[in-house]
Image: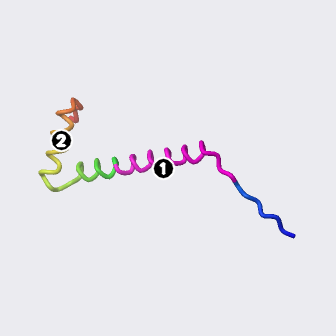
Amino acid sequence: MLHQSTVTIPASTSKSTSAVAQALFAVLLGAFIVGFAGFSNIGAVHNAAHDTRHANGFPCH
C-alpha cells in the first residue's frame, strides 16, 4: 500500500516568498520606467521625468 504524504508550507515562508516577488516586481517596474523616461525620444516624457527629479530635490547633472 502506498501512503500519501502531505507537505505543509509554513505561513512565514509563503509570506516571505510574496515579499520577494513584490520587491522583484517593484524593481523591474522601476527599471522599466526609468529606462523608458531616460531614453525616450519623446521630449515631453523626458522633460517630465527631468522636472520631477528636480522637484523632488534629486539633481541629475
From which residue to which does the magenta span run? 8-29
Mark 1 lies on a secondary structure that is helix
Q: Is residue 55 left or right of residue 12?
A: left
Q: Earlier in the sequence, mark 1 or mark 2?
A: 1
Question: Residue shown at 12%/52% (left/top)?
Answer: 43
In the rendered view, would you say 60 is above or below 41?
A: above
**Magenta run includes residue 1:** no
Name the image quarter holding the C terminus.
top left
Question: Residue shown at 84%/68% (left/top)?
Answer: 2
**Which of the labelled discs sits on residue 53, or is there none?**
none
Q: Residue 42's spot in the image, x, y percent? A: 15, 55
Which one is nearer the viewer's eye here, 25 or 49? 25
Q: Is residue 15 left or right of residue 59?
A: right
Question: Residue shown at 65%/50% (left/top)?
Answer: 9
Q: Amino acid at mark 2?
A: His
Dividing the picture into quadrants, the one containing residue 54 is: top left
- The residue under label 1 is 21
Task: Check disc 1: other Cα within 10 Å, few if <14, some if 14-19, many if 20+.
Answer: few
Task: Check disc 2: other Cα within 10 Å, few if <14, some if 14-19, many if 20+.
Answer: some
Q: Residue 56's spot in the image, x, y percent? A: 21, 32
